Amino acid sequence: MDPAFIIGVLAAFGALFAMITMEGAHLSALLLPAPMILVLGSTIGVGIASHTMRDTILAVTSLGRMVRGAKAPAAAVIPVLVGYAEKARGEGLLALEQELEGAPDAFTRQALQSLADGTDAEDLRLVMEDESAATAARNHVASRFFSSLGGYAPTIGIVGTVVSLTHVLENLDEPDHLGPMIASAFVATLWGLLSANFIWNPIAGRLSRVGAVEIERMTLVTEGMLAIQSGSAPHLLRERLEAMVSVKPKRGAGKAEKRAEDAT
């Protein structure tokens, strides 16, 4: 599990709490149920209204993946693919069927099965790229849903403030209560900005990044499997895949593996 999201959000709210404390304000002045219900409830409502129910369900179900983060860095699949290349080079593509149970994910398992079944290279590329494109589309929908919430929240906060100020103007004959009433009116704007920048936009950004790592991993698997099918040498496959990743694997580990290959 990647704790970056939890750490970041806790740090953001912690800094806000520190400011409130240092200013001598009271947290209870900001935790007003009415503006919170309006901003959070209406933001989610208009977000649902601007998407389909399928989009909404997809976005909600993606929250678990967003918190957990990517299963592993994209580069982590390179040693696995090199191992497949070594096995295929020594025992043939049909031997890859023995690796199905130990495959790291369903996408890799499907590719292994296709190689073992003798699927044509063009057909294999088409299937794998279509699967990658479908996954990228799903990730984009989930990220866009929460990004739209981040766009709606500040405006809805202003709506809440206008509604509250209208109530304030109705009570101008009570000057002793104007100060607290005006302060309460701006809490809605605060929660609109706060929820957008502390909750919705970070979720959207996190989903976008996790999705990018997933697509990068699928791209590596696609190119790796096609190279294995064409009979690429394991050390050449490693060099090619390492050149494709955005975060390079540790050089020491790669050199050690290469020396082991050369020795054999």
Image (cartoon, grey):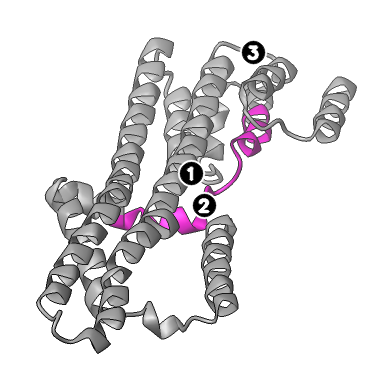
Q: Is residue 113 magenta?
A: no
Most foreground residue, 255 or 148: 148
Query: Which residue is labeled 3 in the image?
Result: 232
Q: Is residue 8 above or below residue 136?
A: below
Q: Nearer the viewer, mark 1 or mark 3?
A: 1
Query: Which residue is labeled 1 in the image?
Result: 210
The residue positioned 56% from the left and 38% from the top of the image is: 99
Q: Residues within 10 Å of mark 3 (few under 14, many from 20)?
A: some
**Do the residues bearing badges 3 and 2 touch, measured as CB atoms within 8 Å?**
no
Residue 172: image quadrant is: bottom left
For the N terminus, give its image quadrant. Answer: bottom right
Residue 104 % position (x, y): 54, 44
Dot 2 or dot 1: first in sequence order is 2
> Between marks 2 and 1, how big is the CA–CA gap?
6 Å
Query: Which residue is labeled 2 in the image?
Result: 69
Q: Is residue 3 above or below residue 106?
A: below
Residue 61 % position (x, y): 31, 56
Dot 3 or dot 2: first in sequence order is 2
The residue positioned 24% from the left and 53% from the top of the image is: 155
User: Three-letter amino acid code at disc 2?
Assistant: Gly
Q: Is residue 80 magenta?
A: yes
The residue positioned 36% from the left and 61% from the top of the image is: 195
Q: Which residues are magenta?
A: 60-82
Q: Secondary structure at mark 2?
A: loop
Q: Is residue 159 above or below residue 186?
A: above
Q: Nearer the viewer, mark 3 or mark 2?
A: 2
